[in-house]
Image: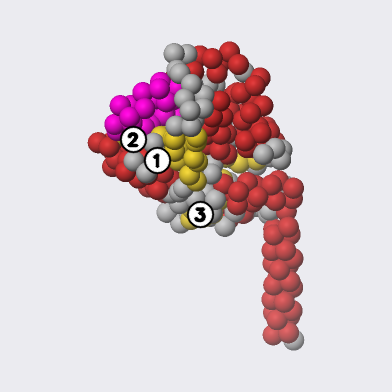
Amino acid sequence: MKKFTIVLIGLLTSLGMVLAGCQGQSSGNKNESFADQVDHKITGIDPGAGEMKLTENKVMKDYGLDNWTLQSGSESTMTASLDKAIKKKEPIVVTGWTPHWKFQKYDLKYLKDPKGSYGGEEEIHTIIHKGFEKKDPNATRVLDQFNWKAEDMEKVMLDIQNGEDPEKAARKWVDENKDKVAEWTKGASKVNGKKIKLGYVAWSSEIASTNVVTTVLKDLGYKVTLEQLGAGQMWAGVAKGSDDAIVAAWLPTTHADYLKKFKDSLTDLGPNLKGTRLGLVVPSYVDIDSIEDLKD
Ligand code: PBE
């Protein structure tokens, strides 16, 4: 009889645990740590992105997230996972950055970074292949004068996200911002089909900026070729000269390694946008506030 009771209690306990487990899976068990709820996983993007290296080599080390994994994918797999989690109100933590349309589409927050491991505010720079300034001072002038604000970039990004073709979204912004474009093209001459090649990575911020610069150069008579590459290939491309320029260098932190590696073959034309930011991003309904809270 005693044995039977023990077995029965055992069975009931297991049943209870199974039920509790099921509950945990569907809505995130409130008693489980955030780390457990997301299986100690940060949803990342393409492995070549500076933010991925920074997260893995610095942030996860600084905050002692040794038993965590940074899952790589792409910007689209990251935003798809985010969308899916938000629809089900499930916990998730992703590598995020600003400017990005996701902050307009969803209610999100950056986790606080008290150790400053992500390096604070940054800039996006325009970089040309060394010697391009001599080869084409006219295009260099335009690239050098190109600069805009996060709000400008966000407008183009959001249009693209809402289904607009990148070229059309860029054309619309250029037509609606003639004054800004006039500043960029000040002192530049029209050309007749001169070639220029721009490298970029398919991050939504870079799709927006590269298409806008392309539109401006085309209006001046340039024949522009766009080359979509991985982050490492983009930097190697402009260093080798297989690409003339990029408008996608996140500095001083995000792409520090790439700049260090290739700096002798490049000329930095300075910032085209100021006030970018990187960090770990969660939906606002998640009840943690700091990267420190990821540790269990
Ligand atoms: N990003 C967007 C890039 C730069 C632009 C933040 C994902 C990176 O991490 O390299």
Write down the residue under mark 3. 72
Q: Point out the tag, 3 or 2, that comes first from the N-terminus.
A: 3
Screen quadrant of the N terminus:
bottom right
Amino acid identity at mark 1: Asp
Q: Point out the tag, 3 or 1, that comes first from the N-terminus.
A: 3
Helix, strand or loop at mark 3:
loop
| Residue beneath the point at 63% across and 28% down | 171
Write down the residue under mark 2. 129
3D distance between C-alphas at marks 3 and 2: 30 Å
Residue 269 appearing in the image: no
| Residue beneath the point at 65% across and 21% down | 175
Q: Which corner quadrant of the image does residue 49 belong to? A: top left
Tell me the tag on residue 157.
none
Q: Position of residue 130 (x, y in %)?
A: 29, 33
Q: Residue furthest left?
A: 264
Proximity of marks 2 and 1: CB atoms separated by less than 8 Å: yes
Q: Which corner quadrant of the image does residue 236 belong to? A: top left
Q: Which of pointers 3 and 2 indicates the residue nearer the eye?
A: 2
Amino acid identity at mark 2: His
Q: Indicate yes or no: mark 2 CB to ligand 1 under 8 Å.
A: no
Write down the residue under mark 1. 243
Between 138 and 257, the one nearer to me in the picture? 138
Task: Assess whether residue 117 is covered by the magenta stretch.
Answer: yes
In the visual, does 5 lie left or right of 291?
right
Q: Position of residue 190 (x, y in %)?
A: 48, 21
